[in-house]
Image (cartoon, rainbow, N blue to C red):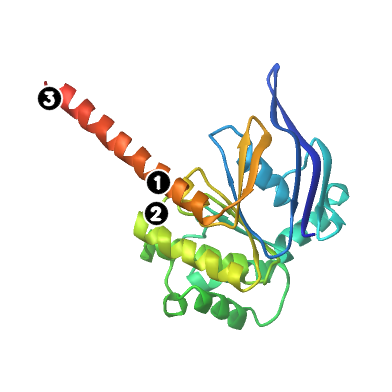
């Protein structure tokens, strides 16, 4: 078992108010799975990802990563796990703008004090089809290229787990498709991929779909071909409704 979570909670104190972002989550994820986590804004999905990525500590409950009890570790051990065992991909790329793609990808290697950083960083860029852009900075790249650099940085240490938070959120549909195909290739090569998204068309690409509401998992199902078709159809219908509503608003303004 790669991930084992039991009764995980996260509570924030917001002035006099207490906000329960996670309300006792149980979850098991096997090594090599491709899982999508969905839910409305405020459902707890991003908070959950931050806890799984050791970017934050739970208020209570337990989290074991590859049989290591993460919730009991020191900050130094957590930093090592983030560097060596988990790769992160974010919607906003989080690249260093004045640094080349090669040096951006090499950052985890440098922090980990590893050798041969240039070769490993080039290998990671090659895996995402960007070795020819190694000397370019993010400012010289398209959004899709920047996200591919971010993925290369995430995989440069060959982590067991990739956590992706809305990785296609800032991209057009064609570029987003290219990014999803990279995640599918990583999964096919044996990497565990956990993808957080609010887009059903993106969630449909996973093997397993988890839906969260009010800090709890309310749905956890395999993505069958029938479910995938239904999710894609709901996305198309939703887009058509939004287009019609937009047209109505424009007509009302014109009138």
Helix, strand, or loop for circle 1?
helix
The foreground one among 67 and 74 is 67
The foreground one among 82 and 245 is 245
Cα distance between the residues tagged 1 and 3? 32 Å
Disc marking residue 80: none
Q: Which residue is mark 2?
A: 171
The residue at the far left in this view is: 255
Disc marking residue 254: 3
Q: Earlier in the sequence, mark 1 or mark 2?
A: 2
Total residue callouts: 3
Report the side of 82 relative to 94 (left or right): right
Cα distance between the residues tagged 3 and 2? 31 Å
Q: Compared with residue 245, is residue 191 higher up or lower down, i.e. above or below? A: below
Report the side of 173 relative to 20 (left or right): left
Residue for point 56% across, 38% down? 39
Helix, strand, or loop for circle 3?
helix
Give residue 49's position: percent from left, percent from top: 66, 47
Give residue 178's position: percent from left, percent from top: 42, 65
Q: Earlier in the sequence, mark 1 or mark 3?
A: 1
Q: Residues within 10 Å of mark 1 (few under 14, many from 20)?
A: some
Q: Which residue is mark 1?
A: 233
- In the image, which is nearer the foreground, mark 1 or mark 2? 1
Residue for point 41% across, 42% down? 234
């Amino acid at each position: 078992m790669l991930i084992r979570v039991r009764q995980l909670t996260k509570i924030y104190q917001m002035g006099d108010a207490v906000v329960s972002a996670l309300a006792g989550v149980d979850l098991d994820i096997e090594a090599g799975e491709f899982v999508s986590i969905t839910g409305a804004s405020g459902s707890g999905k991003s908070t959950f990802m931050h806890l799984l990525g050791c970017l934050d500590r739970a208020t209570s409950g337990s989290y074991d990563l590859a049989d290591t009890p993460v919730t009991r570790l020191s900050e130094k051990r957590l930093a090592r796990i983030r560097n060596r065992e988990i790769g992160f991909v974010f919607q906003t790329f989080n690249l260093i703008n004045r640094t080349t793609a090669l040096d951006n990808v090499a950052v985890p290697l440098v922090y980990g004090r590893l050798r041969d950083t240039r070769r490993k960083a080039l290998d990671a860029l090659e895996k995402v089809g960007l070795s020819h852009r190694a000397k370019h900075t993010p400012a010289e790249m398209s959004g899709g290229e920047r996200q591919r650099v971010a993925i290369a940085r995430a995989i440069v240490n060959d982590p067991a787990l990739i956590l992706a938070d809305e990785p296609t959120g800032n991209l057009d549909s064609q570029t987003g498709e290219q990014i999803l195909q990279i995640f599918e290739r990583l999964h096919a090569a044996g990497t565990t991929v956990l993808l957080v998204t609010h887009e059903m068309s993106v969630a449909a690409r996973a093997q397993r779909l988890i839906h969260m509401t009010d800090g709890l998992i309310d749905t956890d199902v395999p993505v069958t071909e029938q479910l995938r078709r239904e999710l894609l159809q709901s996305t198309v219908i939703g887009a058509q409704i939004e287009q019609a509503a937009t047209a109505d608003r424009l007509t009302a303004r014109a009138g």
